Image (cartoon, grey):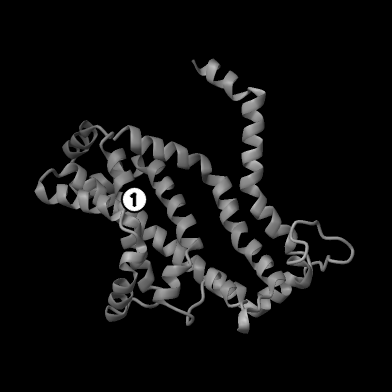
Amino acid sequence: MAKAARAEGNHPVVFTVLVILAALFISPILIVFMNSFKGRFYISDTPFELPNSETFVGLTNYTSGVAKTGFFQAFGLSLFITVGSVAVIVLFTAMTAYYITRVKNGLTSALYYMFTFSMIVPFQMVMFTMTKTANVLNLDNPVGIIFIYLGFGSGLSVFLYSGFVKSIPLEIEEAVMIDGYNPIQSFFKVILPLLKPIAITVAILNVMWIWNDYLLPLLVIGSEYKTVPIAIQYLKGGYGSIDMGAMMAMLVLAIVPIIIFYLLCQRYIIEGVVAGAVKG
């Protein structure tokens, strides 16, 4: 059966379709990269042409964009928020999923369905009340927004963790209990290491979302603290004028880290999602 599937995947028609789809998906990134080396006035006129002796400006767009946006400061802030948010999401949702999976009662069942339900609530439905709540609770700063991301990231993360925890035999925990471990020691010394595949998946999914998020930082911390997406947006000047060259260059710098991170870790996404979905 596996040989048949591989043979079907090697079929010329299937291969051609896959190549075309891959080209379509990657073409926007290539277009942005190509135009990041053109003069700003040539990008709109010839967006699909390679730079030539007339349009090529070297690294001018990159140096100009970095200076105008304060890119490295924004990069540091985005890195702080992303790392902090992902760290608390990975740890606290793992603890939550473990508790509601192992302790069976009405409260834990209600909590599980509340986390699951939160995945289908559109952000636009809660953004205004969330912004007001964040302001009242003094969460409208780079540290406070980490806890807001914890709330928005908990639904999917708890769902994935819960499916994986169900696959861990109870006999393992009973054995360590006999050795004198209490529930907290059992979780951190035995269960948490076993959750590594799904923890990596949760981390990857949330890193890609939080790093690229524009709307939540704009609503909560505004222009006082500029993350990378917000800093790039400020290249748009008055009367709709945009420094297209600098914007293309900053978009390239913004997506390079996340592409490298994804390429290094992408195989864990499939492994973790399959483990969490099938074993549950």
Q: Residue furthest left?
A: 106
Residue 42 in view here:
yes
Quadrant in the rendering for residue 32:
bottom right
Q: Give left or right: position of 151 versus 55.
A: left
Q: Which sits in the foreground, 228 or 165? A: 228
- 277 w.r.t. 239: above or below: above
Q: Which sits in the foreground, 166 or 244? A: 244
Q: Which sits in the foreground, 127 or 276? A: 127
| Residue under the image location 63 percent in, 64 percent down | 251
Q: Which sits in the foreground, 91 or 272? A: 272
Q: Badge 1: few (under 14), some or many (20 or more) residues near its Cα, within 10 Å? A: many
Residue 237 in view here:
no
- Residue 139 pos. (x, y %): 33, 76
Q: State the quadrant of the C terminus.
A: top left
Across the whole image, how many numbered discs are drawn on residues? 1
- 12 w.r.t. 21: above or below: above
- Residue 92 pos. (x, y %): 30, 56
| Residue under the image location 27 percent in, 43 percent down | 162
Residue on which the image places disc 1: 157
Q: Secondary structure at mark 1?
A: helix
| Residue under the image location 46 percent in, 63 percent down | 82
Q: Give left or right: position of 152 versus 50.
A: left
Q: Amino acid at mark 1?
A: Ser
Quadrant in the rendering for residue 35:
bottom right
| Residue under the image location 34 percent in, 37 percent down | 277
Q: Residue furthest right?
A: 53
- Residue 211 pos. (x, y %): 50, 62
